[in-house]
Amino acid sequence: MSTEANSATPAKKTPIVESFLKGCARGFNVGIQNIVPAMILGYTLVYILVATKLMDILGVVFAPLLGLFGLPGEAFAVFVSAFFAKAAGCAAAATMYADGTLTLGQASMVFPACILMGTLIGHYARIVLVANANKKWHPLLLCIPVLDAIISMLIMRVILAAMGID
Amino acid sequence: MTRRTGLYLQNIGMTIIVTVMLLDHYVFALSENYILTCAIISFVLMAIGIRVIAKYDGKKKNIWK
């Protein structure tokens, strides 16, 4: 019965132009409501760290750890920004590249890491808590993105070295 | 806190920092401490707003509950 009804009234096709315009409007809203604020947040965080001279302290403290990946200690600000939002981390890296704190290779190296470990707490709430994952595995699930980010930086370092980019 | 409140906080934070930065760059030089205070305020507002919006968008996307 229901199949007959379905065959009698075929689904109305939306025109391509209308779909395209709807997609544009949705993309614009996502950009305005999600991406732009995250980018401004990243710029603001870097500005605060520079203006309060905390960047210099972070540079000294995290230099040994980040030195393993060929990054200066100041790159820690990128990961702090990425903790809030992926775009914020990428924006922070772009700002630091523009300031001369990071080289082209170092900025390229942190981009995949920002995407892999960015918005960590947000995704933890959205995915792990919503899926009711076993609490025993929660710490592991939080550590996996960080581990992925570390691996991505090592891979990027090898690729950039092979390409001759500093 | 509702999604609308989060959006307000985020927009207020963005407006504050963008206005201050543009004024400082193009109109007249502002005190460094004033810009820093505005930056901290807007950072806090934006961080809270982004968290709230992300929380609500995450709930909306969850079709299984």
Image (cartoon, coloured by chain):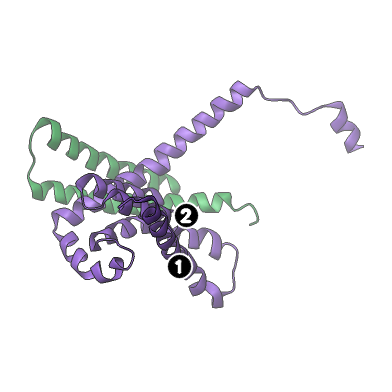
Chain colours: A purple, B green
Q: How many marks?
A: 2
Query: Residue B23's image quarter?
Result: top left
Disc ID at residue B3: none
Disc ID at residue A147: 1
Three-letter amino acid code at the position of disc 2: Lys
Query: Residue A69's image quarter?
Result: bottom left
Q: Does B35 sit left or right of A153 as displayed? A: left
**Residue A108 percent location from the top left of the image:** 36, 50
Residue A134, compared with residue B43, is above or below; it is below
Disc ID at residue B55: 2
Disc 2 crowd rating (10 Å Cα; few below 14, some 14-19, many 20+) is some
Q: Residue at x 21, y 52 (%)?
A: A101
Three-letter amino acid code at the position of disc 1: Leu
Disc 2 to disc 1, C-alpha distance: 24 Å
Front-most of residues B53 and A69: A69
Q: Residue at x 57, y 50 (%)?
A: B61
Determine whether the residue tagged by mark 1 lies in a helix, strand or loop: helix
Determine whether the residue tagged by mark 2 lies in a helix, strand or loop: helix
Residue A9, compared with residue B31, is above or below; it is above
**Which label sits in the foreground, 2 or 1?**
1
Q: Does A101 sit left or right of A4 as displayed? A: left
Q: Residue furthest bottom?
A: A136
Question: Residue under mark 1: which chain is it in?
Answer: A
Q: Residue at x 39, y 44 (%)?
A: B7
Q: Are marks 2 and 1 on the same chain?
A: no
Q: Quadrant of the C terminus of chain B?
A: bottom right
Disc 1 crowd rating (10 Å Cα; few below 14, some 14-19, many 20+) is some
Question: Residue under mark 2: which chain is it in?
Answer: B
**Residue A1 percent location from the top left of the image:** 92, 37
**Residue B57 percent location from the top left of the image:** 50, 49
Q: Are marks 2 and 1 in contact (CB under 8 Å)?
A: no
